[in-house]
Image (tube, grey):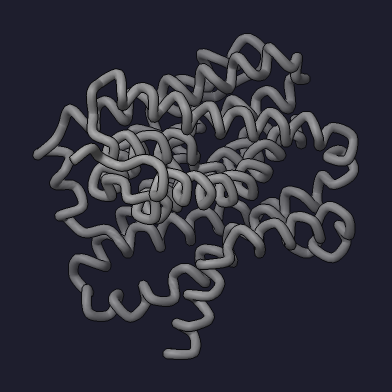
Amino acid sequence: MKILTKISDFVGKWMALFVIAVAALALFVPASCSWIKTSWVNTLLGIVMFGMGLTLKPQDFKVVFSRPRDVIVGCLAQFTIMPLLAFVLTKVFSLPVELAVGVILVGTCPGGTSSNVMTYLSGGDVALSVGMTGVSTLLAPLLTPALTYLLAGQSVDVNVVNMFLSIVQVVIVPIALGFVINHFFGRFTQGLVKVLPLISVTAIVAIVAAVVSANAAKIMTCGLTVVLVVVLHNMFGYALGFVLGKVMKLDAAKCKAISIEVGMQNSGLATSLATVHFAQYPLAAIPGAVFSVWHNISGAVMANIYAKAVKDKA
């Protein structure tokens, strides 16, 4: 178990490099990853969400009741800034429909699972970050389909009910199951949690490999544009999240939490939804896959910048 724990810690620490390496392999030698099927994406994401559930405890949600204003501000930022940014960027860059719907899906998804770690490293308000992730994830079955329909419904057929059921199945049920198991079998899960980074990173890497290898040829023709849009989407998310916190007169720790939570999306969910519900547009899964690679890099960089340069006034 100790060896597995050490491997898990190593993999978790260098997650971004593993994702980049596998994404490059899948892009330039797609046959090497073609055995990982896109039909596995839902199952792989479910595994990641189950792992997230295993780390949650009832006290993680205390912030929702003790500081509701902070959580409401954060969640409103999550479901307004990123969806609107996504919509604006698709128009500015005149993205084709199949890429535009993918970018919008990334924007309408809840906060990413690694945002809590990045918030901790930044010296931000971890309790607020965890609370925002939890609440935005619970709201996702309703808001993600609704916002996707609002922003992309004029261009593509968005089945709101099917998307709702898909998010419940792939996100809510696994998280709830993990939460319940952790609550009743805490001693058992304490040991399991130590190897969760290894399991989660493996699943995320496999999702990226499946999507990139299946669409390698098309990515080569539009790759730079997608990367630019994803980078701008992510960076503007960080910036506007922080600015909103300042406008609401929140302290630096809360601003950092909101900034990172807004900027880092559950891009695995976006990839899953694109694969299942927009199969007629293969490129729709690409923005989510690219975001998965990029936001882990940028999140680590932003955490470092915030930790050194942004501090509360004495």
Q: Residue at x 40, y 28 (%)?
A: 241
Given residues 210 and 156, the one toward you in this image is 210
Report if residue 25 is visible in the image. Answer: yes
Residue farthest to the top? Answer: 154
Given residues 91 and 258, the one toward you in this image is 258
Quarter of the image where one finds residue 179 = bottom left
**Count of marks placed on residues:** 0
Residue farthest to the bottom? Answer: 2
Q: Is residue 176 left or right of residue 236?
A: left
Given residues 156 and 192, the one toward you in this image is 192
Query: Residue 152 placed where, x, y %?
Result: 60, 16
Given residues 151 and 122, the one toward you in this image is 122
Query: Residue 218 placed where, x, y %?
Result: 87, 38
The vertical placement of 131 against 189, above or below, is: above
Q: Is residue 5 left or right of residue 294?
A: left
The vertical placement of 202 against 233, above or below, is: below
Q: Residue at x 35, y 39 (%)?
A: 256
Residue farthest to the front? Answer: 314
Q: Residue at x 68, y 12 (%)?
A: 91
Query: Residue 251 placed where, x, y %?
Result: 23, 34
Report if residue 37 is visible in the image. Answer: no
Q: Residue at x 68, y 28 (%)?
A: 229
* Quadrant in which the C terminus appears: top left
Q: Is residue 282 left or right of residue 102?
A: right
